[in-house]
Image (tube, helix red, strand yellow):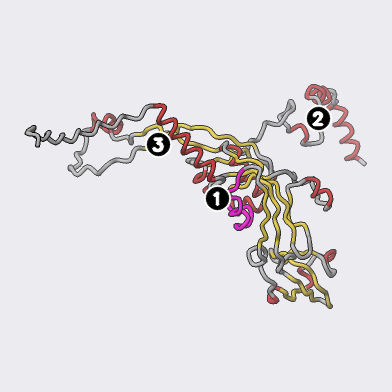
Amino acid sequence: MSDDPEPAAAEDDPEPPAAEPTDEDEEAQSSEEQTETDEAGISESDFVRVDFTARAVESDQLVDTTDPEVAEEEGVDTEEQTIEPRVVPIGAGHLFPSVEEDFVGKEVGDTGSVVVSATEAFGEYDPEDVRTVSADTIPEDDRYPGARVDVDGEQGYVERIIGGRARVDFNHPLVGEDIEYDYEILAVIDEPVEQAKGMIEGLVGVDLEMWIQTDEVEEEVESEGEDLEEEVEPEEEDADQTEDDTAPETELVEYQTLYIESVPQLAMNSQWMFQKRQVAQQLIERLDLDRVIVQETIEAPSGPLGGLGGLGAGAGADIEDVASSIEDVDLEELEEEAAEDTEE
């Protein structure tokens, strides 16, 4: 046996301090997070540009399309609307929920097909929505079977007219039909103004000019608490100074504002009139805005008389010509003619 003492157990070395992450490490982590996001595909809060066509499954009737060729084949009137791929804010209800949900997880370039059930689409047939109304409530030119009519704000189709009564079906023409959407995702829209355009133009179908800018607004600063000390009546000589001292304090606040230039088509659009507050609130929440301002620009009329030259019998006449014609009038001759008319 060896008499050498056993070596002492080595003390545990303390762990070295963790190295602080470098800029390269942070960039690598950010890149990994971005890759994970890209792999996840389109999210529920994205705006996507989509090309789609929707048809009734049973009747093959066209419901909606963004394809100009399909619209031309189906005889769609394109004078009052533009047929082109549409920007869809997912979750805003521009399309049926099941269609928008199918976009989630997809990538740009992907295609898909979704069948929307009749219940989700235009509902099931309701016999109570077929009612008899007075024929006088229908314009005379529309008093025939198959005519589309508006009765007290409800859209319907005339089934038959007997005497002074009309049988009108107020069910949607596609009631009870499943609707199939075939789509292709063309792009993800990240630019805020383009996102705003997609939300509004998708609703009203009107091309609008809009922009986002930061405004500085002066606002009154709220006091933190009331002064509990007794108020002392100021002396007359110090009244003005006291009034200035008690004026409310203000500060400049930055407002991220979306400006929308209104046009006559927008002002007369019924959907916009009833839903503009809801749309504005969605824009504020989804685009991180503080406010939405819709403004109307009225330009000064052209012309030397500020556009009033078209009023009156002398509309458009040169002012000097009018003045000279007044000077040429012979007052004595007019008095003689008036006297002769009185004698007769």
| Real-space CA distance between mark 3 and mark 1, rounded to the nearest whole angstrom | 23 Å
Amino acid at pointer 3: Glu
Q: Element at badge 1?
A: helix
Q: Quadrant of the N terminus?
A: top left
**Residue identifier under label 1:** 277
Image x and y of residue 34, in percent: 49, 37
In the image: residue 232, left or right of residue 76: left
Disc 3 target residue: 219
State how far apart marks 3 and 2 are (Cα): 50 Å
Label 3 secondary element: strand
Nearest to N terminus: mark 3 or mark 1: 3
**Quadrant in the picture for residue 324:** top right
Instruction: State which quarter of the image contains the C terminus.
Output: top right
Q: Which residues are magenta?
A: 92-107
Residue at 33 percent of width and 40 percent of height? 222
Would residue 209 be found to the left or right of residue 58 on screen?
A: left
Residue closest to the eye, 8 or 226: 8
Question: Label 3: few (<14), some or many (≥20) within 10 Å?
Answer: few
Residue mark closest to the camera, 3 vs 1: 1
Q: Earlier in the sequence, mark 1 or mark 2?
A: 1
For residue 139: magenta? no
